Structures are given as C-alpha cells and as structure tokens.
Amino acid sequence: MVNKNQLRFTFHVLVFLFFISLSLNVFSAPDEGMWTFDNPPTKQLQEKYGFTPTQEWLDHVRLASVRFMDGGSGSFVSPNGLVLTNHHVAMGQLQKISTAEKNYVAEGFYAATLDQEIKSPDLEVNVLVSMEDVTKEVMKAIKTGMSDAEALKARRAAIAEIENKSLKKTGLRSNVVSLYHGGEYWLYRYKKYTDVRLVMAPERQAAYFGGDFDNFTYPRYDLDFAFFRVYENDKPVKSKHYLKWNAKGVEENELVFVSGNPGSTDRLYTYARLEFQRDFQYPMILKYIDKRLEILREYAQKGEEQARRALGQIFGLENGKKALTGELNGLLDEDLMAKRKKDENDFRKLVANNPEWQEKYGNAWDIIAKTIDQNKKVARERFYRRLIGSRMAGNATTIVRYVVEVKKKDANRLPGFHDSELAELKFNLFSPAPIYKDLEEALLVGNLKMSIEELGSNDEFIKIVLKGQSPEKVVKDLISGTKLDDPGFRKSLIDGGEKAVNESDDPLIVLARELDPMMREREKWNRENIESVLTAASEKIAKARFAVYGKTTYPDATFTLRLSYGAVKGYPMNGTKAPFKTTLYGLYDRSLSFNQEGDFVLPQRFWDRKDKLDLSTPVNFVSTNDIIGGNSGSPVINNNAELVGLIFDGNIESLSGRFMFDKEKNRAVSVHSAYIIEAMRKLYDAGKLADEVVGEIVR
Amino acid sequence: MVNKNQLRFTFHVLVFLFFISLSLNVFSAPDEGMWTFDNPPTKQLQEKYGFTPTQEWLDHVRLASVRFMDGGSGSFVSPNGLVLTNHHVAMGQLQKISTAEKNYVAEGFYAATLDQEIKSPDLEVNVLVSMEDVTKEVMKAIKTGMSDAEALKARRAAIAEIENKSLKKTGLRSNVVSLYHGGEYWLYRYKKYTDVRLVMAPERQAAYFGGDFDNFTYPRYDLDFAFFRVYENDKPVKSKHYLKWNAKGVEENELVFVSGNPGSTDRLYTYARLEFQRDFQYPMILKYIDKRLEILREYAQKGEEQARRALGQIFGLENGKKALTGELNGLLDEDLMAKRKKDENDFRKLVANNPEWQEKYGNAWDIIAKTIDQNKKVARERFYRRLIGSRMAGNATTIVRYVVEVKKKDANRLPGFHDSELAELKFNLFSPAPIYKDLEEALLVGNLKMSIEELGSNDEFIKIVLKGQSPEKVVKDLISGTKLDDPGFRKSLIDGGEKAVNESDDPLIVLARELDPMMREREKWNRENIESVLTAASEKIAKARFAVYGKTTYPDATFTLRLSYGAVKGYPMNGTKAPFKTTLYGLYDRSLSFNQEGDFVLPQRFWDRKDKLDLSTPVNFVSTNDIIGGNSGSPVINNNAELVGLIFDGNIESLSGRFMFDKEKNRAVSVHSAYIIEAMRKLYDAGKLADEVVGEIVR
C-alpha cells in the first residue's frame, strides 16, 4: 500500500536525484572549482582525466605552497627556501626597498650570492600545515533564542578562543575560516615566516609587458616572475617540500593543477546581493577608483621621483579597475544573471518542497534581500566616512583603538584586536617601509574632497575632520604635524599604552581620538543590523545547500589554500581561436607591431641578446583552471607535482568568474617554466639561480 | 507679416538644417563610405586629413584599378600590364588550371619569363574608363499611369538600349548601374580584357595562413597576393596608368585610400527588409550552406584528388558562412537594429512633415513591408526550385533560353540575354575550365534531396525532375548521359540554334526544356509582383532621400568602382588593443603557438629560409577604410597614389558593416607592400618580378 506521505517522499527522492545528477553534471563537465585540500575533486579528476592524487601528493603540494600575506601566492622551488611568485606580487616590496637612487621596479634585481639578498620590510608568508574542522565547536556557541547580533558576538568569541588556544599550544598562526558562507568552520594552522628576502626580479617592462592594455588578456608575453628566499634565524630555511622544476613545461591538453590562494568569489551569493553589487557597489567603487587614479596621475606628473612613488598604487588601481569592470560586465550580462536567477529558483523550490527545510531555511533569501535594501542606505556613508589614501591615518586609528582594546577580555574586543591577531597587527604597524608624506597629502586632500561631495559638508564625519576649515588646510596641518611616518614613534605610542595615546598631541592621533566614538557607534550599528543578519541568513542557506545537494561543491574563495584542476587549452576568441601557448617570436612581434612604444617597449637587453635566445621558447600558456585574484604567483603543476608554469593572470572572459565560471572561455594565464629559465640564463646572467631551481646545485 | 504657410516653411527649413548637420556629422566624423568617383568625399577629406585629391589623381587611380569579373578587385602595378590581386581572388583560376598532377593551389606558381605565364580559362577583367549620368534617359521611359510591372519592363528596355548603343558606338563593355536603389542611373564603360595570364601565386598555405579560423579576423599574417598579366593581341598591354609601388608601406595614422569594387551592402534598406533578412533570408542561406558543405566534405574525404577538386567550393562556402554569420550577428544586435529603426523613423518624419514629399514618397515604406511579407511566401520555393550545385545544369538552362531569346526584339528579352550581355554570357558558357562530373553528381544529389525536403515531393518542380524515380537514379542518368562538360558540345548547340536544342536528346537539355515553361511563369510572377514593386518603392525612397538630405551620402555597394578613405590604426580588441600592423615575428609565433598544426602549418621554405628574412618586416596592417566583399585585391594607396598595401579582408567587427558602419572597430585588413617584396625576393626567388613592381626593370 502506498500512502500519501510515502508518495510525496518518493517524489522528493526523484526530484532530489534529478538535481543531484544535474549538479554533478554542472560540476564535473567543466574544470570548475577552487577546492579545499580536505575535499579534492577526486571523482571529477578520475572520470575526466583518469588521475587520482594520493594523500601524499596532496600533502606535498600543500606544504610546498606559500601564501603571501600582502595578497598573492607562491611556492617553494628549491630545498633552500627559494620561493617563486609573480613580479606583480613582489611589486609592493620592490617599491618599498627602492629609493630615488635605486629603482628595483624599473631596473630589476638579482642577488648572485646569499649575502646580496635584500630583506623585505613587511612581507609575511605562510605555509598551511594543518586543517581541522571546528564547525561544531563554533556552532555550539550559538544558543537557541539568541538574536542575530548576539549570535555574531558569540560566534566571534568562540572563534577567537579557538584561535588563541591553538596559537598558544602550537605557536602556529591559527585562523578559523568560514567556508560556504558559514556552512563550515575550519581551523587553519600556518607556519609563518617574516624574514623573506628578495633574490631576483626582472625589470617591470619585461614582467608587465603590454601594461594595463594587455592586463587580463591573452595572447600574452609576460615575464611576470620573481624569486624570494625564506629565512629563519638568519639562515635559508630547509624547505623539504618544494616543487621540482620541469623546464619542458606543458603540452597541449595536458592536465595541470593550480595550488594557491584565491581571494574571494561571490558564486554562492543570493540574487539580491548580486543586484546590489551590480546596481550599487560596483558603480560606487569604480567611481572612487577613477577619482583616486586622477589624483595619483596628477601627483605622478610632478617629476620622476613622484612617478616612482605613485607607480605601485597606480598599478594596483588600474588592475582593480580592469578587474572590477570585467566583473561588472558579468553582472550586466543578462544570460549570466538569468542563469543565476534560475539556479536560485531551482534551489529554493527544492527547499520549499521539504517542509522541514522550508521551516528552517526558507525565509533566508527574503531576509537577505531586505537587509541588503537597508544596507544601500548606509553603504555609501560607511565607505566615505574614512580618511582614505593615508597609511598614517589608518595607523592612527589602529593605535587609538589598540591601547583600549587590548585591555578588554579577548572575547569582547573589536575584530582585528584578538590576541591571535596582534602579531600580524604589529608586524604591519611597525613596518619600516617608507611613507611619502607628500603623496599621502595629495591623496588625503583629493579623497577628502570626494567624501565631502558624497556625504555633504554637514555630515558628522566631515564636520569633525574639517572643523570649518578647507580640506587643503586641514590635511596640510595633519600631515606636516604628524610624526607617524616614523615607525619608532608608532611603537612608542603602543608601548606607552592608553596614557601615551591620550596625551599625544600628534594631530593625526588627536583626530583619530575625536572620530573614534562616532565610528564605533556606526560600526556597532552595522554589525547589529547588517552584518549579523546577513551572517545568520547566509549560514541558513549554506545549511540548506548541504541538505539539498550534499557537499558536492566547493566553497567560495576565502584567500585560503585551494586546488584547481584543468587542461592546457586554447579557446575561441574574437572570431578565431587563441592558441594554448605563445612564444618569444610573439613577444618581439607585439613590441614591433606597436612601434616599440609605451607599454610595448622591451628592455634593451631583449634586443642586445635576441640572437642568443631560442625564439621558439614558449612564453605564456593558458589552461582551463578556475582561479581568481589572490592566485597570482600560484604554481602550475603537472600530475607528477612538477612545476610547469606560474599563474599570473586570467583572461578577460574569466573576470565574470567571480559570479559564475565560464566553462567555454575561462582561462588562467601562466608564465611557462621554460621562459623563466631561458630568460635567467640568457638575458639576466642568472645561470646560478637557474641551476638552483632546475636542481643542479644546492646552495 | 508672417502667414501660416511661411511659418511652416520656416519650421521645415529649421528641421531640415538640423538634420543636415546631423547627417553631415554622421557621415564625416567616421571614415565611412564607399564613394563613387564622380562624388568623392572631398569635404570630409579636407576637414579631417587636410588633403584634397585632384581630378588627375582621381582619374589616375580609377584607370589603374581593375575589376575581376569572377568577384574581386586589383590594380595595375607596372607599365606592362602586371596586375596585383589577392591569392583568394586568383584561387578560382588556380583551381581551373590545376590538375591531379600539378596543383598550383597547393604548390604556388611563378613564371620567371613571359612565355611561362599561364592563360586563365575564363577570367575577364575590366577597367572603368568613363561614367555618365543617364538618370534622365532611363527615367523618361517611365510614363505616368504605368503599373509597377510595366515600369520595370520599360526601365529594363531603356537600359538595354542605352547599353547597346554605347557598346556599338565605343566597343566598350557598357553597363547601366542603378545607384542609391534607383536614385540615379549611370552608364559605366569599361575596357574589357579576357586574355589574363597568371604570373605568380604563393602556396595557399602562406596566402591563407590560419585558414577559416583566422579568416575575417586580425591580428593576421597572410601573404594573400597573386600577380596576373593582362594581354591584348598576345602581347602584354601597355598600362600607362599603374600604381607605383611604395615598399616602405604605411605608417601609423597615415591617410590611405582603397580603390575597388565592393560587392553589395544593405545600408539603405528599409527596416522591414532588414527584418526579412534577419528572420528569413540569412537562416535559410546558412542552413543551405551547412548542407552543401556537408556534401562537399563527404566527397573530399574520398581521396586526395577529390579533396583538390572540392577545395575551391569548400573555401568559398566557409568564407561565405563566416561572413553571413557575422552579418546575421549584426542583424541580431539590438543596438544596431534600434539605430536603424531610429534613422528610418527620423527620415520618415521629415518626409511626412512636407506634404508634397509625403504625397509622392510617404507610402513607400509600407508598400515594401507588404511586398516583403508576400515575398516570404515564395522566397523558399524560388531558392529551392533550382538544380543547385551543377555548372552543367546551369549551362543547360542558359542554352535552352538563349536560342529562344536571341530571336526576340532586344527590349523583350529576359534579363541576361540582351545584346549587350551576350559576349559575357558566351565567355562564361564556353569556358574551357574543367567540369568534374563526379563532383557535380554528388552535389546535385545532395542538393536535390534538400529541395525535396524543403518543397515536398508533390512540388511541381520536384515532380518534373524526379518523374517518380529516386534522386540518386535521376542524377546518375543525367550526369552520365550529358555531354555538356564538353565546351565544344555547348558551342554546337548555341550555333545550331533552336532546332538543334529542340532536337537534342542530351538528358540535361531535355530536362531544362521541360522545366523552362514553369520556371518562366514563376519568374514572370515574381517580376510582376515582387521585384517591380520593390524597385518602384525603393526608387521613391531614394528620391525622398535626395530631397531630404541632398547627395551627402554614398550609394550602397553595387560591385562597381568605389573610393574609400581612412587611417592606418589599431583598435580596441578583446580587453586590449589590436596593433596597427603585424610582423614576420608574429607569423612564426602563431605557427608555433599551434604546434605548427592544421591551418597553422607554414610552407617548408619559411623554415628553410627564415634566417634570410628580416623578421621585423611588416606583414599585414589595418585601416579604418570602409570595404566589403568584392574589395578583395583592392590596392591600398597613400596620398601620392603609391601602392602601400593590398586589401584582403575585413576584421570580424566589420561584418555588420553590410548594414551599418562601426566607426570604432571597423577595420580593413591588408597585406603590407613590404611583405610581398620581401617574400618574392627571399622566399620565392622571384626577384625579377619584384624588380618589375618596384620599377627597376621594364619587361
């Protein structure tokens, strides 16, 4: 006998199986996904490529992978702590060690011996040594009946406690990571290194050949690499887990992996959040970037040294602008949005069809939509109520808050001030990297004017900052009066504690003190009315997703270690096809085809030594790997875990990947391993370093 | 005093001036237009480039320009009748002179001496020696009160008479051309040459490097050139007007002109016609092309010789498919269509605002829309009621009609059979070019099956052809039984007149006789109900256009000589920019980046002789010139009328140019003059020919 309930159950099972098969299809056919190392896509790999990585393989790759805390990835490539990353990941440190006299960005750098290697002022790199699922521990902090705000606080406290305990016990950097938007919490422990020395970087002209034009595009011809060496106790670390260099590189259609730290994606965002991004967030940020670029370019016009100082920021903003524009184009793509809408509707229908799920999770989407609507009203204020563009102003706020926060019980502190976070905070705060007061002044004035324009001069924040004076006058006084460009002064305030900070008459500290109560109030409101509500609702959706689909998918990117797989493969482009690789012939072609002008100028050594080069050497290649910003510098490895390439970009079609993977045209762009060796040996007289990476000598 | 009428007039003048200024803007800002030589865009040239061509300059360029009657353009480049065109324009003749033993398409050809030059079997080339406005003469044939059908007949008769008179008087090929869709009629007189000999062609692999993939795209690396020599009385003609070769070629942003014969554009079509194209015509043709390609590829699979025989058609269809797909994408582009709709609405409003214009022209758009609607019902029938794919079947119809038509008064003949057209008809009909019966059989069977599918087996045409038998059987009998592959047999039927044709038992002639009455009936209906109505209404619109805008624009392309101007300039492409030129470095890059496979294989000589080449030699370049199919082989000249390049393609963005010029991204793609010389001297041992074109020797 078949009763009604049973029928309904059967229907559910059928619908469920139908969607599972759909979802497997979606996630196995394309080479999609940024997979955590605890949940690698073994089924897809086996089915599509007939390859299953062993646990040993996975552990080795993970331990050879390096995270650059200033935003990038890398890998050990010799047993002596040598780390490969991108030139554009090294760029920040190259800027910081350069001076008016010695411009390592423009000229490149090579340390032929260990003693010539230059210490980075404030570079921290991490190796992920363990991962532990702490979802239950975090979750048990949330008691029934708690408001969203109370839950957020409780969750934060629990996380801080887990992190602290781990730090004390292991001495390792310990971070609890929220995956699947709260679906899981994992304790990631990192071996952390802060003595990281520059070994080699080519000139930017070779690394970033084609400039902003060619950025995020392909075919491409960039030598975007740099080498650092990791030290401990003033000696190169013995990096047991390092990637063997395969100078033959890749063949067409070959299976390759990328192990790195994708920054963030929004693939699990609800449709309402995508609309907010499309209609509000992106236009706002892009407007701001344009303004900031305008200020920087005006400043850079003033002279060669000013141009040098502004270069890093200009690059970062141009890069961001191009990426965000591509992402916004994804959001403006009606097909993409329709697909996202459909996916969400299908998902919600499956939830709704199960009364228990509907009861527990069903209202989450509407809550998010409503909260996002509220957020619109305050997001612009939140963005513009900051002293944008000045490291010193940021430091002032940090110092003013630090001395108060550290006195509190760990659980009650503001985010960023938990015991487990203080080492990083101080490492950044006390960085000896140079601060250019004239540049900060230019930025602060420009951005302050923009804030006035956006908020109006009657805004509380603006009134506190200006006190009736002109932005120019206020900023001039702040910047000329402050001593916060001196790391020693910053340290003295931290060491002096609340008393020293309260008595300080440093104008930026004074202003930070004045702003702090209002800012705290605003942030609190935001946590209680926006963040906590979104967190709770997102967590519901994450649980619903696990309930409906199981753990068949990967979480959105979180700047933690992920494995992506794919094949080396060209793609349809602009009416024809883009090849899977480019060669040195193409580099010379592109330079000459633009009359060797602007961003297409090649360093003189490329012409002087052209005849020494094998012009058929592969330069860059593309693969179907699923990556995003933060993956820069990631190693590309073959199934023997040998290094065959170096991720440095995604193609223009991959930019909408923040919201949805384009299985036909998404491509990751890498420097070919052969090009790096060819260049080191024949262009940069760095044969000794080349020998180290290909394994012929040990230092 | 200002009376009402005067007010209205003033308003009209204002509106008129407003639109004139708009329209000047539209047509002068971008480098748009395929201008007739009687109406060059001197104002735009002077304003934008500060250059005004003299009448002498215009005459010289016109007289150095050559039209290839099998569909292309070219130019004299030496005083001894040497003509430069594209390899792909020469392709048809190369196919026709090739055999299983000697494949000039694959191997290329070079005649080191005059006596080695090979006569083309059926190539006619033309030089436009004069142009005469005969609008009034044509128009006066149309009497008040004539129906559209009568008017069409009268117009045709008048045109035939003008052409005949001119032919008899001057001995020149005389064609009356309808410009602006009937807005003007011009008598074009051509010096016609039919002894045209092949001098040189590279291997197709170099000429068409990148194949169908790279076709209609850029950056590009093609050596798409060929040389013919024009003979008269078995001697090279003395071509006084020839273009001096400038082997330095072009610089970025340089002003260049293209003089050639664009085939057709639909920029002045009404919106209703565009919709018909989009929804009906393009899908139908693309479906047909796919089927025909399928048949040809199956045939080509059978062996090397079959592949050789089918190559020309496959190339033509692939080329057509890519072009039509690009054009259809233009029609599917909502912005483009909205712009066309708006332009039409603006135009109609201006007409409607003037009672006289409205009375004379106002109903034309609705008439066209209604007629197009009727056309939909018969267009498919018209297309599929043909024995498609067989030159012999086409010849049979021509022969059957010829013997009847030539007995009539010239004015009463079918189009194509007027005295002035007979020389061309016979030149084609008696062509000694080989006919491959097995290929014709394969195509005829396949296409006949498609006709059955489209029309149904009860269709009148199908019934006459099949007579209850299978398509395979019918076609086998037709092809094996016919002797029409023999030019002598074709000639004997023409010479034997109506009697010989009526008594012939050649199965294709018999079938053509059976089909003729029905086909004539259908064609008559079509002329009377579709063509004549569209012609009359289009003429009205043309007159309205002149009334509203004056002659500020250029006519749609008509495969007659046009001048286009533009600048050598890259363009935004796929997130970056495409360079204005490419170099030989890029050619080697593209070949290697595809592992030298498939369409990216370079002829061996390119590898053997690579070190002799200057790899920085420019290969191809792009300019903003407005061109379309038929312009292939056109010379690109600088303002000294020196040859700097050779048109061979448009970029993918230019394909929607059939309907609207894309001022930002439309680019014409040319072979650089330097590459042709470099290749002739260093790759093809054709230094003597290179000397002739650069002017160092005279044969």
Image (spheres, coloured by chain):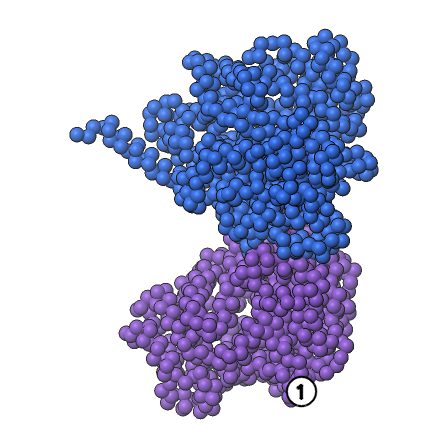
Chain colours: A purple, B blue
Decide: few, some or many residues near mark 1? Use Cα within 10 Å; few <14, some 14-19, many ≥20.
Answer: few
Left/right of residue B71 with respect to residue A310 in the rendered view? right
Residue sitting at x 62%, y 49%: B674
Residue B526 lies, in percent from the top left, at 57, 19
Q: In this view, does A316 lie above or below B89?
A: below
Residue sitting at x 66%, y 55%: B614
Pinpoint the chain carrying mark 1: A
Q: Is mark 1 on a helix, strand or loop?
A: strand
Residue sitting at x 75%, y 60%: A251
Residue sitting at x 71%, y 21%: B430
Res A627 quadrant in image: bottom right
Residue A492 lies, in percent from the top left, at 45, 90
Residue A233 lies, in percent from the top left, at 65, 89
Q: Is residue B546 above or below residue A318?
A: above
Q: Which of B503 and B562 is in front in this view?
A: B562
Quadrant location of the C terminus of chain A in the rendered image: bottom right
Q: In this view, does A128 lie above or below B483?
A: below
Q: Residue furthest top?
A: B499
Mark 1 belongs to which amino acid? Lys
Residue B544 lies, in percent from the top left, at 40, 27
Q: Which of B523 and B308 is in front in this view?
A: B308
Q: Mark 1 points at which residue?
A: A235
